[in-house]
């Protein structure tokens, strides 16, 4: 898939990994639509880049559909969909304060997993409606998991479950959509310097980065964005989850 001239939609595109991906796709000539629940940041970035913006809570089908339609409008069909919207929650299954509340678990799964699925199913439907390219390809869907899907730590039961779900649907989704020339891949980042870690002080972030085998630092959002673009451009890459973690394997704590 050539990025230049293709229409691309990035959910969670106003900050962190999503912002970096939106910038990278735009720099490579894609017609980008940024979708995010944060209207102020999203509109500011869209205005800076001269691209489209859609307010979008990925849990809401109508809002995701609206973002997909906005990205598919104009010249050409929707070709690239990148799911970066996500959040976290830290709490143990049970302890001295009682059981893990059900509501935050549902919220994390709803945003991270169901939100990713919403983009996948609705973007894929829009891609199917479009004409295939000369090589038969119609589109590429890139999803965001986490190494917590494999190495979930103490207190990460909700987050790890949601990200494991994203990993688990990657291959069957790729198989479902293969007949239409749509590829599905997932990136599982390790420790990245994103707003999720921004609450930690610089010293704490440095300590986390030092635990990565190599390079001994936090990942940069641009490195995620580069891999997302590589996935889009490499036609043989399909149904795969790629760890992007500097060989990090998370300990229990």
Image (cartoon, rainbow, N blue to C red):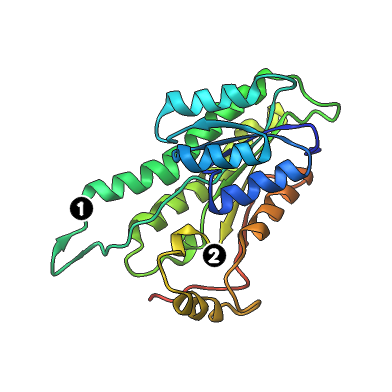
Does the image show residue 170? yes
Residue 180 falls in image quadrant: top right
Q: Quadrant of the C terminus?
A: bottom left
Q: Residue at x 55, y 34 (%)?
A: 120
Residue 31 falls in image quadrant: top right
Judging depth in this view, the residue of 72 and 91 nearest the camera is 72
Label 1 CA crowd tier, 10 Å (few <14, some 14–19, many 20+): few
Against 30, residue 84 (above or below) is below
Instruction: Read off the residue under disc 1.
Output: 101
Residue 51 picture location, percent across and down: 65, 33
Judging depth in this view, the residue of 237 and 30 nearest the camera is 30
Q: Residue at x 54, y 76 (%)?
A: 209
Q: Residue at x 32, y 62 (%)?
A: 90
Residue 12 picture location, percent across and down: 51, 43
Residue 59 horizontal side relative to residue 138, left or right? left
Against 130, residue 109 (above or below) is below
Judging depth in this view, the residue of 172 and 52 nearest the camera is 52
Q: Residue 193 shows which numbered tag?
A: 2
């Amino acid at each position: 898939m050539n990025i230049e001239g293709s229409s691309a939609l990035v959910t969670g595109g106003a900050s962190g990994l999503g912002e970096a991906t939106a910038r990278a796709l735009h720099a490579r000539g894609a017609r980008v639509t940024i979708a995010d629940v944060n209207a102020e940041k999203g509109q500011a970035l869209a205005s800076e880049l001269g691209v489209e913006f859609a307010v979008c809570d990925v849990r809401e089908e109508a809002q995701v559909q609206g973002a997909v339609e906005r990205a598919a409008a104009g010249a050409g069909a929707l070709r690239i969909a990148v799911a970066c919207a996500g959040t976290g929650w830290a709490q143990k299954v049970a302890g001295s304060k009682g059981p893990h509340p059900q509501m935050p678990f549902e919220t994390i799964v709803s945003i991270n997993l169901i939100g990713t699925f919403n983009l996948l199913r609705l973007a894929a439907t829009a891609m199917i409606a479009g004409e295939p390219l000369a090589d038969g390809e119609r589109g590429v869907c890139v999803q965001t998991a986490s190494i917590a899907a494999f190495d979930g730590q103490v207190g990460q039961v909700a987050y790890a479950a949601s990200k494991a779900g994203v990993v688990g649907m990657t291959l069957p989704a790729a198989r479902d959509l293969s007949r239409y020339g749509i590829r599905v891949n997932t990136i599982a980042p390790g420790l990245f310097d994103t707003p999720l870690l921004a609450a930690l002080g610089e010293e704490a972030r440095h300590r986390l980065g030092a635990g990565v085998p190599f390079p001994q630092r936090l990942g940069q959002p641009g490195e995620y964005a580069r891999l997302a673009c590589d996935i889009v451009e490499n036609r043989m890459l399909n149904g795969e989850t790629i760890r992007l973690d500097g060989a990090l394997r998370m300990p229990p704590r």
